[in-house]
Image (cartoon, rainbow, N blue to C red):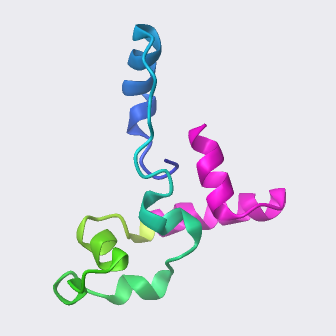
Amino acid sequence: NLIERTGERDLIPMAREMGLGVVPYSPLAGGVLTGKYGRDDLAATNAGAQDGTRRSFNITNGGLTARNLDIADVVKEVATELGRTTAQVGLAWTL
C-alpha cells in the first residue's frame, strides 16, 4: 500500500522475474488510507486502546502513527485533485 512500500524494492521485482502474481495485503492500511482515522485517534494510548476495535488494532500494531496520517493527508489531496475518494486512490495504487 502507499504507506508500507517495502515490497516494491524486493518482492515485486522478484515475483515479476519468477512469473508470479502478487496479492496485496491491506491495500488501505487497515483503514488509514480511507480517511477513517484522524489526529484525534492518536491520543489513545496503547494501554487504553485494547477495546477490540480496528482503531485499537492499528494503534497497537503501529499502523496508526503521525507519519502514516501525514501520508494519508497527501493521498487525500491527490484524491481531491482527481475527484476520487482516498480509498479509490489507495486501491488504484495496488493495481
**In the image, 63: left or right of 13?**
left
Camera-side residue of 56 and 81: 56
What secondary structure prevails in the magenta region?
A: helix
User: Which quadrant of the view contains residue 14?
Assistant: top left
Residue 94 lies in the magenta stretch: yes
Q: Position of residue 47 (x, y in %)?
A: 16, 85
Who's the residue at 21% across and 81% down the image? 46
Q: Position of residue 73 (x, y in %)?
A: 61, 67
Q: Quadrant of the C terminus?
A: top right
Would you place residue 21 above or below residue 40 in this image? above
Residue 6 lies in the magenta stretch: no
Would you place residue 48 above or below residue 83 in this image? below
Who's the residue at 45% across and 41% down the image? 24
Q: Which residues are magenta?
A: 68-95
User: Which quadrant of the view contains residue 58?
Assistant: bottom left
**In the image, 27: left or right of 84?**
left
Who's the residue at 23% across and 71% down the image? 60
Q: Position of residue 49 (x, y in %)?
A: 24, 85
User: Which quadrant of the view contains residue 88?
Assistant: bottom right
